[in-house]
Image: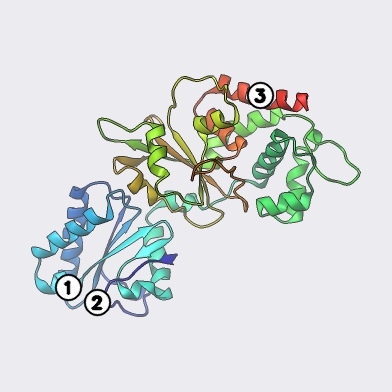
Amino acid sequence: METGKASNSDQLPQELDPRNWPPYETVLRLRSARVLRAALLSIAVKIAKRPAETGLLILVDPHMTESRIRREVEDAKLALHDWISRGLNLVLVFGTRVEGVASTQTESFLNWLSTATGANDKRRMSVRSRPPSHFVVLQILILNWMKAAGAVSRMEIGRIAGYSYPTVAKALTAIDDQILPRSDKRVELREFPRAVWSRMVATNETLRKPVRFRDVSDSPRSPEALLERLARFPRADLAVGGVLGARHYYPDFDLVGTPRLDLSMHCPSGEPDLSFIRSLDPALQESEKKSEPAHVVIHLIRRAKALFEPSNGPIPWADPVECLLDLHEMRLESQAAEFVHYFESNRAEQ
């Protein structure tokens, strides 16, 4: 984990282990002041039962603004005994970034914090995993095919994917019949591999593990308006995909309106930092229910190279394979087929 700016609050014990944990309360993806106040009461009670100790309120990926959280904490301290108020410390965890009291910057605390928070959130642990190697390698080859970039070496595929040469070679055996034979052993697809692609799409959501956000307000912003707001604080690890990305690559894309904002996040390892969602729109709340309409969807790219396409603005475009997968995820099958046909036509003209 990375560490943020520390305050001048009381110090925590320098060595933290399961036998000497301080009183703490953990809230995952905080969504309301009501939940925050309940957590503050809970940690205050724990501190009161263990006088002279420092207690921690740990908020992991909160969906409330940081200023609102700190205001609620300060208001709560006004109602507490001074010795409880002095012992209550706030720790905020935004993806891999940690902000809190001074001793939260020590390695021992960060190791303890990973244990204290990770054991309570299976979803956060699950997103660390990478898709199977054949999934990633096939994406790279299809992208190469879409760009009509010609054959690529196994070493280059490994560099892009972040895999060793043997791993790439093993992944290629699954699609050996789709590859043009070459004497130099470089790799190129014969054509768009529809049969293999269909199997890939069938497991798309399971392998990519999208993170969905819905707008809980009465007047949600349009995807275009959200993109304008995102442009105010661009991040190098984000790119635009989905329908907006597909329209960039294929100007005649046949769909009225934009269902949602799809973003691809380059996160080769560790936890994704989704803290920008709070600034994008405070009304966006994470939703794990596929039945609920999503307004923003984040797709994690776990390969070594992001392969984003530059744009005229501050936010780049996700690659066309990512956009195609997004279309399938939205069940826009006819538009996805037309998108592939567009690239086929371009290759035929070359």
Q: Is residue 58 above or below residue 335?
A: below
Outermost residue toward the bottom in this view: 14
**Neighbours of disc 3 within 10 Å: few (<14), some (14-19), many (20+):** some
In this image, 163 relative to 153: left or right? left
Element on which disc 1 rests: helix
User: On the rendered image, what quadrant is the N terminus found in?
Assistant: bottom left
Quadrant housing residue 96: bottom left
Q: From the viewer's side, name the closer residue of 146 and 208.
A: 146
* Mark 2 vs mark 1, CA separation in Å: 8 Å
Expressed as whole percent of the image width and height from the top left, the position of residue 117 reads 37, 60
Q: How many marks?
A: 3
User: On the rendered image, what quadrant is the C terminus found in?
Assistant: top right
The reply to whether callout 2 and callout 1 are in contact (CB within 8 Å) is: yes
Q: Residue at x 59, y 25 (%)?
A: 336
The reply to whether callout 3 and callout 2 are in contact (CB within 8 Å) is: no
Outermost residue toward the front in this view: 312
Expressed as whole percent of the image width and height from the top left, the position of residue 194 reads 69, 27
Residue 343, disc: none
Q: Residue at x 54, y 28 (%)?
A: 247
Task: Give the labeled residue for mark 3.
Answer: 342
Can residue 115 be seen here? The reply is: no
Element on which disc 3 rests: helix
Element on which disc 2 rests: loop
Name the front one of labels 3 and 2.
3
**Neighbours of disc 2 within 10 Å: few (<14), some (14-19), many (20+):** some
Task: Give the labeled residue for mark 1.
Answer: 86
The kind of residue tagged 1 is Arg
Task: Give the labeled residue for mark 2.
Answer: 10
Q: Residue at x 16, y 76 (%)?
A: 51
Quadrant housing residue 144: top right
| Dot 3 or dot 1, earlier in sequence | 1
Name the front one of labels 3 and 1.
3
